[in-house]
Amino acid sequence: SYDTSWARYSGDDQALVKVRVGSGSWQLVYEYDGDYDGPMVHDLSGFVAPGESFRVRFKYVGTNDYWWSIDNVQILGAP
């Protein structure tokens, strides 16, 4: 989970959340399709099995002065 604020300036802007398991390729978890401000939660269980090492990447692609802020990132295991 994390708190985020994203403002899209044009259709070319992208805000992507990706996951990489081990040395595999980056897989898309979520792509923002419009402005958003608030908490987000993504279930990674479809990508990562218990005990596997993984990385999460937040990737912004754009050429303008708008923003994507990310704060309070937490990675939680199954209860």
Image (tube, helix red, strand yellow):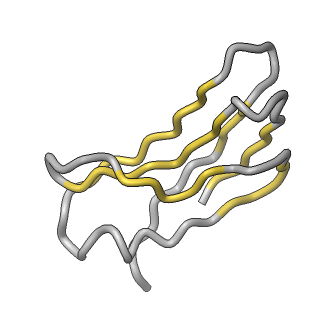
Name which quarter of the figure residue 71 lies in: top right
> In the rendered view, does 55 fall on the left or right side of 18?
left
Relative to 58, is 20 on the left or the right? Answer: left
Q: Position of residue 29 (x, y in %)?
A: 49, 59
- Tell me the quadrant of the picture where the N terminus can be found: bottom right
**Residue 42 on image: x %, y %:** 56, 66
Q: Is residue 75 left or right of residue 30?
A: left
Q: Quadrant of residue 76?
A: bottom left
| Picture coordinates of residue 40, whole percent (x, y) | 68, 60
Residue situated in front as seen by the camera: 74 or 40: 40
Front residue of 6 and 50? 6
Total label count?
Answer: 0
Location of the C terminus by quadrant is bottom left
Which residue is pictured at 37% across the width and 76% down the height? 46
Which residue is outermost to the left?
23
Q: Nearer the viewer, residue 34 or 58?
A: 34
> Which residue is the extreme one toward the bottom?
79
Residue placed most toward the observer, 73 or 20: 20
What residue sits 29% from the left and 68% below the top? Answer: 48
- Return the x and y of residue 27 as percentages of the image width and height: 37, 53
Quick one: which residue is furthest to the front in this view? 11
Q: Is residue 45 above or below residue 22?
A: below
